[in-house]
Image: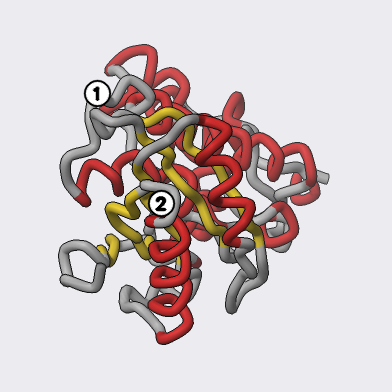
Amino acid sequence: MCAKESFSIKQWATDDKPREKLMDKGRTALSDAELLAILLGSGNAQESAVGLAKRILASVNNDLNQLAVLNLEQFMRFKGVGSAKAVTIAAAMELGRRRRETEHKTQVKISSSSLAFSLLAPFLEDLAHEEFWVVYLNHANRPIRTEMVSKGGISGTLVDVRVVLRKALEYGAVGLILAHNHPSGTLSASTPDQELTDKIKLAALAMDIKVLDHLIVGQKGYFSFADEGLL
């Protein structure tokens, strides 16, 4: 009968309980597996929540960025992870992303590709599909709006230049920073990437709007058209 029960955190010895460890020693004292175990709450008939958490983390090479990319179905492939646990983990990952986003909402001025990346990374670096975003800037290079203008599949997304520029006129923007992600992780510009950049840049110039950069975002960094002299 016991073999059918999952190993709840409540059943563990005090020294092995991550919840109590967090309360006693603080959250920074816990390992990634222990923090994930708290979200899981219990394991399965063969392993504790910490054991299950370690197995989940091992599947993504203990990389939290890769963990954040997993969808609900992928979490639920692990024995002991049902829809409720999968949703809890996904919600925690999203809160972490939104915290990073909030930290950059008060960004005073975008003066480098690294600052642009810090603003855009929370939106793009963990996606399993491709999206195209635009940062609309005022005359002082301060963000007016940061918006997704196109969403596609794994290999690409179609971008309507008219939509990008219509929004620029609507917001009164004088500068644009373009960005899209490569789910493959490849940090280089393809020929279509360059052609789209040139197309938007040319159309924007006719309206006295400048394209200041185009970032290609991956999980491990970014590629900047401006830094590489491609604008």
Q: Outermost residue toward the top?
A: 23
* Image coords of residue 14 (percent x, y): 44, 23
Task: Tell me which residue sits at (43%, 39%) in the image.
Answer: 136
Alpha carbons under labels 2 and 1: distance apart: 29 Å
* Picture layout, residue 227 above or below residue 208: below
User: Where on the picture, by quarter, is residue 100?
Assistant: top left
Q: Which residue is mark 2?
A: 64
Position of the C terminus, as image quadrant, is bottom left
* Image coords of residue 47 (percent x, y): 59, 52
Disc 2 residue type (three-letter): Leu
* Image coords of residue 117 (percent x, y): 30, 48
Q: Say whether disc 2 or disc 1 marks the residue closer to the N-terminus.
A: 2
User: Where on the picture, by quarter, is residue 74?
Assistant: bottom right
* Image coords of residue 146 (percent x, y): 48, 37
Tell me the number on the disc at residue 151: none
* Residue 19 is at least partly visible in this image: yes
Q: Which residue is mark 1?
A: 108
Q: Choose between 1 and 99: the one closer to the eye.
A: 99
For the rendered model, the colour scheme is secondary structure
| Left or right of residue 51, residue 217 in this image | left
